[in-house]
Image (cartoon, helix red, strand yellow):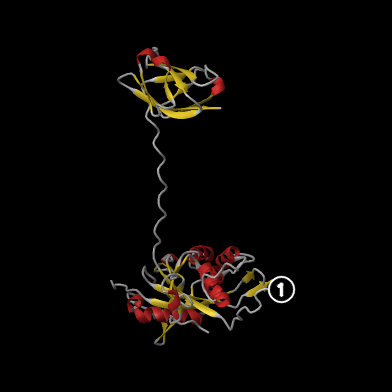
Amino acid sequence: MATNSNVVVNLNISANASGTIDVFGQTTTPTIAGNILVASNMLPVSNLYISSSNSLIKFQGSNDDILATRDSNFSTTQATFLTDLNAIINGSFNCSNASPFSLARYSNVYDTQSNFGYVALGYYANQLFGHVAATAAIANDSSFISYITSNGAGTANISSNLVSSIFSMSDNAATAIAKQVIGQDASRAMSQDNDLNAPNTYQALKWIDGDVIYMNVTLQPPTVTKQSGQLQNITTFSGDASYLLKITLGTPAPAPAPAPAPAPAPASALNLYASNGRLISNGATFSTSYGAAASKSPPYVIQFTVKDTSNTDITSSTTWTFANTGVASLYFNIPGVVRLNDIATTQVTVSDGTSSLTFNLQITA
């Protein structure tokens, strides 16, 4: 069985984007050379290839050439592709090889941008105010970023437009992609007679983890709105700025598992009751107001009863320990009779020498 190796492919698709910059007072066929943005998030291979009979693009040999087409029976939906690509648009990018972030005056301070919205904002800010982070005068920076990274009515629809281009690609575009893949890794056309029964038989174009694809996004000059009399000499945009998104295929890391819920406090052999008959379990919080205490002014006195598993009252033989002795103590050293100096909360541990029970005692106004 042939061993696959990674390929680097230009998908020859493009999307344009622009937006409105509100100022206080006043997007050819892409090439791999250019303003390259390296995406931190990976695109699942399943958006391009699932199995030998289930792939976005299928191809066949024909008269010593390759012909390819998009497979309309590919099981990955446009909606799934959109979701995964939008996660990339909303993920961070390394911009160290993209202007204006790569300009010498910026060193490497702005090499990483949080999402493509920040890339667009930085490009526009640099054009308008001479610095990628000169966004203080832009009144709608947050909404602009959301506009660029979102899909739907009233947004830039970058992910949606790119995916639409993929799912409507012509046979010529599909053929160009297939030739790039097979030209770099002929093993993907091996182990099968590619010419058998052509033109009726096709082979799925295989993609693997580690393959790299490029997509182009062109930022067109924005609409700049400003109040009269302010910032009259804003830079005029001379043209578009194209960015190549460098995306690696792979299996995204699974989301971290949620933290386990804290284990409940173990049951105690002691049964603790408040004066109103309420059973207080181990680890619970018993809260009462000073109006319910035996004394209506400091110190507030609260009565408790402790019973063992046979329901025998053992209060008098228990030991009481307070986490904060400054606010709570036993009243005249009588087990079960607690005094609090003021409105306060403290942790209390009750023990009969064999078993113990801990609870939080809270008295409020």
Residue 203 percent coordinates (x, y): 41, 74
- Report the residue that reaches farthest toward the bottom: 63
Compare residues 215 and 357 and report the one nearer the observer: 357
Query: Dot 1, crowdedness within 10 Å: few (<14), some or many (≥20)?
Result: few
Compare residues 260 and 117 and report the one nearer the observer: 117
Question: From the viewer's perspective, is residue 263 above or below residue 95?
Answer: above
Question: From the viewer's perspective, is residue 150 above or below residue 255?
Answer: below
Mark 1 lies on a secondary structure that is: loop
Q: Quadrant of the C terminus?
A: top right
Residue pictured at 40% horizontal, 43% vertical: 260
Q: Which residue is mark 1?
A: 228
Residue 199 visible, this orientation:
no
Q: Quadrant of the N terminus?
A: bottom left
Residue 161 visible, this orientation:
yes
Question: From the viewer's perspective, is residue 273 above or below residue 130?
Answer: above
Quarter residue 66 falls in: bottom left
Compare residues 313 and 232 and report the one nearer the observer: 232
Residue 109 percent coordinates (x, y): 43, 70
Question: From the viewer's perspective, is residue 269 above or below residue 13?
Answer: above
